[in-house]
Amino acid sequence: MTKRAALYIRTSSEKQAEKISPQAQETDCREYCRQHGYKTVEVYRDTERYRIGRRLVEPSGTRADRPELRRMLSDAENGLFDVIISWREDRLYRGIRPMLDVIDCIEDNHLDIELVKENFDRKMAPIKASIARMELEAKEERTKMGMFGRL
């Protein structure tokens, strides 16, 4: 039986989405599906800012409220696909809460995650999500220090 695949594409910001990243991610994911004989049934793209209350927020991997991530998880519960294909694990999440949502969903619905550029290991997911969050926090701190230094 042919696996039905959902592709998940994410950029950290709208500015990044204006570059090649989303197209390259999707092209690589589609090629991966072709090579493995999977049928792409849906592409979920979190590449634009979205509104939370009165604020516009970027589609950061630390956020669990990304609209297309939420739609993908809902569609997974409705049995629309068998496997989630993403470019890298950090496209799915970069924090503990979104990682838990994704892991709970794949376990509850007996789905797989396959990554184009790296291997996925459920046992390592919490560790990688924590490290990714620490990396983002350090980057933010360095950016603030650099801006303060220029002032």
Image: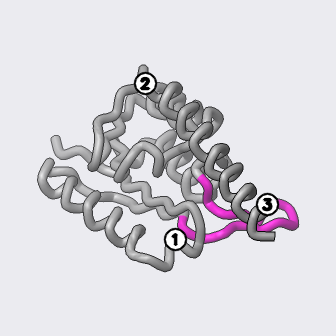
Indicate which disc, 3 or 1, sits on the residue closer to the N terminus: 1
Q: Which residue is mark 2?
A: 124
Query: For the residue labelled by badge 2, is the local secondary structure a helix, a strand or a loop?
Result: loop
User: Which residue ends up furthest to the right in the rendered image?
Assistant: 54
- Residue neighbourhood size for the residue with mark 2, other residues' Cα within 10 Å, grouped as few (<14), some (14–19), many (≥20): few
Marks 3/2: CA–CA distance: 30 Å
Q: Nearer the viewer, mark 3 or mark 2?
A: 2
Residue shown at 15% from the left, 57% from the top: 34
Query: For the residue labelled by badge 1, is the local secondary structure a helix, a strand or a loop?
Result: helix
Question: Which quadrant would residue 84 be assigned to in this image?
Answer: top left
Q: Is residue 129 above or below residue 12?
A: above
Q: Position of residue 52 (x, y in %)?
A: 79, 60
Question: Which quadrant would residue 8 be assigned to in this image?
Answer: bottom left
Extent of the magenta region: 47-60
Query: For the residue labelled by badge 3, is the local secondary structure a helix, a strand or a loop?
Result: strand
Q: Position of residue 139 (x, y in %)?
A: 62, 50
Q: Which residue is mark 3?
A: 52
**Residue placed most toward the observer, 25 or 19:** 19
Residue shown at 56% from the left, 61% from the top: 12
Q: Is residue 16 above or below residue 124?
A: below
Q: Amino acid at mark 3?
A: Ile
Marks 3/1: CA–CA distance: 20 Å
Indicate which disc, 3 or 2, sits on the residue closer to the N terminus: 3
The answer to whether marks 1 and 2 mark residues whose Cβ atoms lie closer than 8 Å is no
Q: Is residue 114 above or below residue 23?
A: above
Q: Nearer the viewer, mark 3 or mark 1?
A: 1
Q: Position of residue 112 (x, y in %)?
A: 34, 35
Q: Which residue is mark 1?
A: 16
